[in-house]
């Protein structure tokens, strides 16, 4: 890019105040020394934009003086973000506050030490400008003191507490942000962390340089969530922006152990390992052995590291563990570090002895860690003692990183827009000839982890000489249903009052087909209800074209009424002026999605009955589908379950353009329950299908047996608030959501989620098949 000259901004300088022209002569040359031509262009464009705000010369002068210092700390890419933040708050606060924001930015950049954290700080300023604008000025005046004691996360919680507690009490709001009130000081102490990274950054850099004689790039990052672990990315060590003491071990020592371990990865890892064909749990166990390998090499060079790492492994923790395997793994990691330690498990002792006997000859080979890790996984798998990945990653060795540096994955095609690809999506599906199927397929009964799935266009049977109608094909017996492309949906975070973009991923799947006769048997079993359904059909079926008589401004003359009017005139009476009529088309103009919760809890039996909630749900869905099908409304039968935010499973048993025939009945008969209930993502996806319909009225009828929940979300309020937000979003697009819940304790949450009159609680679950068609009739009649 060509160089930027001050003369290029002659028009701006002519319009600017004299003070700005004077200061720009000195600041421009300083900025040109620090920034690239592109950064210098952003710098000058920002000055021009701030000048156009007409908030006085002090704002522009402060920006010109302070921004080069900010760019020096965090890089010139932060300049457009600072200008954008100023523009956002310009309509909410005064120019003096914006000036104060720019004057304090060098201190903020120095305290936070990372461009991404500074961007988070600017977002906080924007939020406070909209919720507690009067608190901005005093907070910015004390920002140096605040960031010397708090991380960005702590500052956000401290500020949000004051903004919410004193939203309408302006005097106390000002006192809180001015650090004058007792609540302000108490919250400050509550959010204060042990050791801030910015205070020990130079010590850590010197520490690593003393060990390995080279520099490492260390950056802080916000550790806002429970499962956060440090990580290495693009040759940069990302560590938490603050660390508390662990037992009697100081936070500085924990920082040293962390950066020494991460630097060992960078020094002693010569090649990454492939993650193909490995489950997440297997990758964890391999990572555990790779950690032991690189720590062995580091201790050979620097024996003092063994004492440091061992002290953190032997620290005592007050909190309990979720699974009995976790303390076993923690002790195993200690055994791999120190060969003198034993336990009561003979198989694990033999494994550790094998590791120590072989590590000397294999210390430079990470494939050795791969083989040993898989062997360790098999030991625990044979005992059925492998917990979920979420529990495994919470093992209490605080200095270790997440091991992403040791793996390499398949390249992602960014043009496809897919951020996350589940294992089931990486398979290749091919249609082949019967000859290839017969002679070249590796395994007819391959599992779900097969690299390729072959389907045959012809009906290929187990025994070709069996030509009866009862003969099953390979596809019918062992076929694997296809999985759709991913659908990404936002999710509402009630704590920060913002959407998490593309947070939940929905995959449309198909369950194996069942016997359609099971659905017909349901109609036979519920004959009394079926009779009531026929009455509902007769009552709600649209009448088509109807004549509305007795109108003054109708479309045509009503002959009978006109004759009566003439008779009245002849008799000298006042005639009835309503002698016209109009033809009106009576239609319901309604489309419906019946959305079924298929979580694991639906497999539970109902009271003393032999039926499960899932069976009753199937019966209710059958009866309501029969009713809607008879009325003629376009409708769909869908279901959902979830296995974390990356895999919300959505099932389409019957679509709008499909008849309620044997195909749809067989899908409904094959319905099974499992996993969890991420309700917000499922509702958004149901709305995605419903909004494609042409009908004016749109309804989602949700049948569930509990509140929203998922395995990767510990805060019970998060998914409740997200579901409430999804319901509001659908309502804004013209989609009404009605909940039929089977949870007798739903009063505590269902009203807040769905609204005053948009839910029904079924007291007796066994009456669900009877209640659902009646509910539909009352909603749509």
Image (tube, helix red, strand yellow):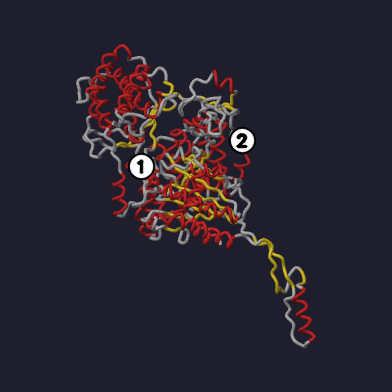
Q: Secondary structure at mark 2?
A: helix
Q: Secondary structure at mark 1?
A: helix
Label ID, residue 237: none
Foreground residue among 119 and 368: 368
Q: Disc 2 designates what residue?
A: 7
**Side of 275 relative to 469 (left or right):** left
Q: Disc 1 designates what residue?
A: 147
Quadrant in which residue 565 is drawn: bottom right
Point 55% across, 22% down: residue: 437
Placement of 445 over or under 710, stated as above or below? above
Point 52% across, 32% down: residue: 476
Q: How many marks?
A: 2
**Side of 222 relative to 6 (left or right):** left
Percent of width and height locating residue 84? 52, 43
Foreground residue among 153 and 474: 474
Residue 82 visible here: no
């Amino acid at each position: 890019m060509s160089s930027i000259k001050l003369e290029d901004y002659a028009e701006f300088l002519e319009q600017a105040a004299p003070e700005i022209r004077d200061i720009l002569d000195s600041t421009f040359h300083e900025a040109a020394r620090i920034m690239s031509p592109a950064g210098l262009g952003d710098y000058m464009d920002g000055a021009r934009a701030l000048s156009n705000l007409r908030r006085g010369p002090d704002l522009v002068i402060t920006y010109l003086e302070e921004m080069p210092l900010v760019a020096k700390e965090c890089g010139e890419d932060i300049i457009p973000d600072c200008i954008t933040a100023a523009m956002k708050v310009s309509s909410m606060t005064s120019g003096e506050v914006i000036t104060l924001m720019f004057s304090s930015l060098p201190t903020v950049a120095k305290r936070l030490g990372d461009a991404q954290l500074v961007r988070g700080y600017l977002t906080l300023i924007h939020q406070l400008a909209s919720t507690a604008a009067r608190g901005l000025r005093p907070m910015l005046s004390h920002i140096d003191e605040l960031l010397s004691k708090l991380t960005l996360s702590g500052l956000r919680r401290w500020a949000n507490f004051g903004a919410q507690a004193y939203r309408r009490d302006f005097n106390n709001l000002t006192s809180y942000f001015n650090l004058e009130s007792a609540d302000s000081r108490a919250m400050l102490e509550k959010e204060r962390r042990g050791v801030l990274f910015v205070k020990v950054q130079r010590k850590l850099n010197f520490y690593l340089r003393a060990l390995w004689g080279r520099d490492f790039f260390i950056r802080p990052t916000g550790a806002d969530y429970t499962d956060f672990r440090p990580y290495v990315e693009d040759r940069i060590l990302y560590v938490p922006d603050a660390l508390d003491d662990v037992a009697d071990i100081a936070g500085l020592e924990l920082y040293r152990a962390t950066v020494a371990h991460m630097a060992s990865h960078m020094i002693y890892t010569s090649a990454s390992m492939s993650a193909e064909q490995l489950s997440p749990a297997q990758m964890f166990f391999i990572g555990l052995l790779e950690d032991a390998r690189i720590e062995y090499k580091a201790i050979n060079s620097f024996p003092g590291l063994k004492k440091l790492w061992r002290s953190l492994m032997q620290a005592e923790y007050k909190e309990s563990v979720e699974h009995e395997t976790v303390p076993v793994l923690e002790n195993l990691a200690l055994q791999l570090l120190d060969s003198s330690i034993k336990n009561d498990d003979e198989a694990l002792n033999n494994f550790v002895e094998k590791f120590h006997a072989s590590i000397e000859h294999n210390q430079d080979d990470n494939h050795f860690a791969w083989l040993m890790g898989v062997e360790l996984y098999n030991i625990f798998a044979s005992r059925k003692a492998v917990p979920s990945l979420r529990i495994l990653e919470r093992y209490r060795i605080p200095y270790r990183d997440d091991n992403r540096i040791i793996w390499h994955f398949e390249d992602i095609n960014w043009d496809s827009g897919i951020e996350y690809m589940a294992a089931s999506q990486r398979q290749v599906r091919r249609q082949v000839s019967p000859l290839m199927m017969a002679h070249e397929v590796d395994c007819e009964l391959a599992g779900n982890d097969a690299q390729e799935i072959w389907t045959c266009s012809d009906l290929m049977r187990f025994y070709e000489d069996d030509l009866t109608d009862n003969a099953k094909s390979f596809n019918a017996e062992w076929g694997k249903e296809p999985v759709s492309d991913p659908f990404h949906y936002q999710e509402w975070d009630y704590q920060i009052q913002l959407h998490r973009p593309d947070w939940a991923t929905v995959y449309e799947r198909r369950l194996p087909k069942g016997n359609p006769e099971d659905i017909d048997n349901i109609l036979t079993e519920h004959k009394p209800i079926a009779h009531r359904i026929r009455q509902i059909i007769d009552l709600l079926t649209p009448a088509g074209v109807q004549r509305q008589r007795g109108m003054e401004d109708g479309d045509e003359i009503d002959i009978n009424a006109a004759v009566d009017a003439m008779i009245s005139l002849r008799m000298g009476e006042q005639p009835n002026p309503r002698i016209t009529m109009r033809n009106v088309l009576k239609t319901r103009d309604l489309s419906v999605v019946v959305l079924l919760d298929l979580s694991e809890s639906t497999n539970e039996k109902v009271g003393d009955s032999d039926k499960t909630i899932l069976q009753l749900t199937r019966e209710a869905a059958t009866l309501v589908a029969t009713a809607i099908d008879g009325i003629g409304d376009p409708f769909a039968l869908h279901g959902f379950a979830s296995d974390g935010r990356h895999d919300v499973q959505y099932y389409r048993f019957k679509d709008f353009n499909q008849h309620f025939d044997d195909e749809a009945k067989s899908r409904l008969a094959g319905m099974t329950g499992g996993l969890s209930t991420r309700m917000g993502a499922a509702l958004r996806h149901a709305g995605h299908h419903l909004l494609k319909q042409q009908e004016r009225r749109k309804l989602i009828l949700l049948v569930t047996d509990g509140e929203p929940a998922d395995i990767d979300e510990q805060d019970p309020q998060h998914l409740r608030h997200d579901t409430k937000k999804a319901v509001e979003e659908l309502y804004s697009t013209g989609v009404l959501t009605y909940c039929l819940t089977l949870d007798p304790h739903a009063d505590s949450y269902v009203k807040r989620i769905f609204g005053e009159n948009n839910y029904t609680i079924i007291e007796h679950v066994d009456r669900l098949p009877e209640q659902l068609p009646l509910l539909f009739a009352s909603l749509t009649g």
